[in-house]
Amino acid sequence: MTPNPSSSLPQHTWHRHLPSPIRILLEQVQEAVKYRLNILSVAGLRMLVEAVGKTEAPEATSLRGYVDALLRRGLIEPKLRVWLLAVVDHGNTAIHETVAVQGEELDALLLPVEHLLREIYGLRATVPPCPGRPAH
Protein backbone atom coordinates (compact mmCIF):
# COMPACT_ATOMS: atom_id res chain seq x y z
CA MET A 1 0.00 0.00 0.00
CA THR A 2 1.39 3.40 -0.90
CA PRO A 3 1.23 6.43 1.34
CA ASN A 4 -1.30 9.14 0.69
CA PRO A 5 0.76 11.89 -1.02
CA SER A 6 -1.44 14.63 0.44
CA SER A 7 -0.78 13.40 3.98
CA SER A 8 2.39 15.01 5.19
CA LEU A 9 2.26 14.58 8.93
CA PRO A 10 5.30 16.33 10.36
CA GLN A 11 6.59 15.65 13.85
CA HIS A 12 5.87 18.86 15.72
CA THR A 13 7.96 20.04 18.65
CA TRP A 14 5.00 19.59 21.03
CA HIS A 15 5.02 15.83 20.31
CA ARG A 16 8.01 15.38 22.60
CA HIS A 17 5.95 16.65 25.56
CA LEU A 18 3.35 13.91 25.21
CA PRO A 19 3.36 11.03 27.69
CA SER A 20 5.19 8.17 26.00
CA PRO A 21 2.19 5.84 25.49
CA ILE A 22 0.15 8.68 23.98
CA ARG A 23 3.03 9.81 21.74
CA ILE A 24 3.54 6.26 20.46
CA LEU A 25 -0.18 5.85 19.77
CA LEU A 26 -0.32 9.21 17.95
CA GLU A 27 2.65 8.22 15.78
CA GLN A 28 0.96 4.92 14.92
CA VAL A 29 -2.31 6.69 14.07
CA GLN A 30 -0.43 9.12 11.86
CA GLU A 31 1.21 6.19 10.05
CA ALA A 32 -2.20 4.57 9.58
CA VAL A 33 -3.52 7.86 8.14
CA LYS A 34 -0.48 8.11 5.87
CA TYR A 35 -1.19 4.66 4.42
CA ARG A 36 -4.95 5.24 4.25
CA LEU A 37 -5.78 2.58 6.83
CA ASN A 38 -8.98 4.42 7.65
CA ILE A 39 -10.63 1.96 10.03
CA LEU A 40 -7.44 1.67 12.10
CA SER A 41 -6.91 5.44 11.92
CA VAL A 42 -10.36 6.28 13.28
CA ALA A 43 -10.18 3.55 15.93
CA GLY A 44 -6.79 4.95 16.96
CA LEU A 45 -8.16 8.49 17.23
CA ARG A 46 -10.85 7.17 19.57
CA MET A 47 -8.14 5.41 21.59
CA LEU A 48 -6.22 8.69 21.89
CA VAL A 49 -9.30 10.46 23.29
CA GLU A 50 -9.73 7.65 25.78
CA ALA A 51 -6.04 7.67 26.78
CA VAL A 52 -6.12 11.41 27.45
CA GLY A 53 -9.35 11.03 29.42
CA LYS A 54 -7.96 8.25 31.58
CA THR A 55 -4.82 10.28 32.24
CA GLU A 56 -6.38 13.70 32.83
CA ALA A 57 -9.85 12.81 34.20
CA PRO A 58 -9.49 9.41 35.87
CA GLU A 59 -12.67 9.93 37.91
CA ALA A 60 -14.82 9.44 34.80
CA THR A 61 -16.00 5.98 33.83
CA SER A 62 -16.83 6.25 30.11
CA LEU A 63 -15.53 7.91 26.97
CA ARG A 64 -18.25 10.55 27.07
CA GLY A 65 -17.56 10.98 30.77
CA TYR A 66 -13.87 11.62 30.07
CA VAL A 67 -14.70 14.28 27.47
CA ASP A 68 -17.24 15.93 29.79
CA ALA A 69 -14.73 15.89 32.65
CA LEU A 70 -12.12 17.56 30.44
CA LEU A 71 -14.67 20.30 29.72
CA ARG A 72 -15.58 20.72 33.42
CA ARG A 73 -11.90 21.02 34.32
CA GLY A 74 -11.48 23.78 31.75
CA LEU A 75 -9.01 21.73 29.69
CA ILE A 76 -11.15 21.94 26.54
CA GLU A 77 -13.76 24.32 25.16
CA PRO A 78 -17.35 23.34 24.32
CA LYS A 79 -16.65 23.37 20.56
CA LEU A 80 -13.79 20.89 20.99
CA ARG A 81 -16.07 18.71 23.14
CA VAL A 82 -18.49 18.41 20.20
CA TRP A 83 -15.65 17.38 17.88
CA LEU A 84 -14.20 14.88 20.36
CA LEU A 85 -17.60 13.26 20.82
CA ALA A 86 -17.80 12.95 17.02
CA VAL A 87 -14.38 11.25 17.08
CA VAL A 88 -15.68 8.84 19.73
CA ASP A 89 -18.82 8.08 17.70
CA HIS A 90 -16.84 7.51 14.49
CA GLY A 91 -14.32 5.41 16.41
CA ASN A 92 -17.09 3.24 17.82
CA THR A 93 -18.47 2.74 14.31
CA ALA A 94 -15.01 1.82 13.01
CA ILE A 95 -14.50 -0.68 15.83
CA HIS A 96 -17.93 -2.30 15.91
CA GLU A 97 -19.03 -2.03 12.28
CA THR A 98 -15.64 -1.89 10.49
CA VAL A 99 -16.70 1.24 8.63
CA ALA A 100 -14.73 4.48 8.66
CA VAL A 101 -14.72 7.94 7.14
CA GLN A 102 -12.50 8.63 4.14
CA GLY A 103 -10.26 11.42 2.83
CA GLU A 104 -10.98 14.90 4.10
CA GLU A 105 -13.42 13.60 6.70
CA LEU A 106 -10.60 11.57 8.26
CA ASP A 107 -8.36 14.65 8.27
CA ALA A 108 -11.21 16.55 9.94
CA LEU A 109 -11.28 13.99 12.78
CA LEU A 110 -7.50 14.04 13.18
CA LEU A 111 -7.34 17.80 13.68
CA PRO A 112 -9.38 18.04 16.93
CA VAL A 113 -7.47 15.14 18.47
CA GLU A 114 -4.16 16.81 17.66
CA HIS A 115 -5.60 20.05 19.04
CA LEU A 116 -6.53 18.24 22.27
CA LEU A 117 -3.04 16.83 22.64
CA ARG A 118 -1.35 20.14 21.87
CA GLU A 119 -3.60 22.04 24.29
CA ILE A 120 -3.20 19.63 27.18
CA TYR A 121 0.40 18.52 26.81
CA GLY A 122 2.15 20.89 24.44
CA LEU A 123 1.02 24.19 25.91
CA ARG A 124 1.53 23.04 29.50
CA ALA A 125 5.17 22.20 28.80
CA THR A 126 7.84 24.32 30.39
CA VAL A 127 9.02 27.04 28.03
CA PRO A 128 12.83 27.24 27.90
CA PRO A 129 14.50 30.58 28.58
CA CYS A 130 14.57 32.92 25.65
CA PRO A 131 18.02 33.42 24.13
CA GLY A 132 19.45 36.90 24.40
CA ARG A 133 18.87 39.39 21.63
CA PRO A 134 21.63 39.62 19.04
CA ALA A 135 23.94 42.62 19.32
CA HIS A 136 23.68 45.24 16.59
Image (spheres, rainbow, N blue to C red):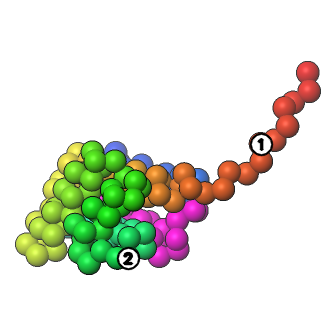
Residue 135 on image: x %, y %: 92, 27
Q: Kindly identify which residue carries mark 1.
A: 130
Q: Give the residue at x 23% y 45%.
A: 104
Image check: 60 left or right of 131? left
Looking at the image, is mark 2 or mark 1 earlier in the sequence? Answer: 2
Asked which secondary structure carries label 2, the reply is loop
Q: Give the residue at x 30% y 68%.
A: 66
Image check: 67 left or right of 127? left
Residue 27, compared with residue 86, is above or below; it is below
Q: CA distance from mark 2 to mark 1?
A: 35 Å
- The mark found on residue 58 in the picture is 2
Residue 114, compared with residue 64, is above or below; it is above
Camera-nearest label, 2 or 1 = 2
Visible residue check, residue 62: yes
The secondary structure that dominates the magenta segment is helix
Image check: 123 left or right of 119? right
Visible residue check, residue 4: no
Q: Which residues are magenta?
A: 16-33
Q: Quadrant of residue 34?
A: bottom left
Image check: 126 left or right of 131? left
Residue 39, compared with residue 34, is above or below; it is below
Amino acid at the residue labelled 2: Pro
Q: Quadrant of residue 38?
A: bottom left
Q: Residues within 10 Å of mark 2 (few under 14, many from 20)?
A: some
Q: Is residue 118 magenta?
A: no
Q: Is residue 20 magenta?
A: yes
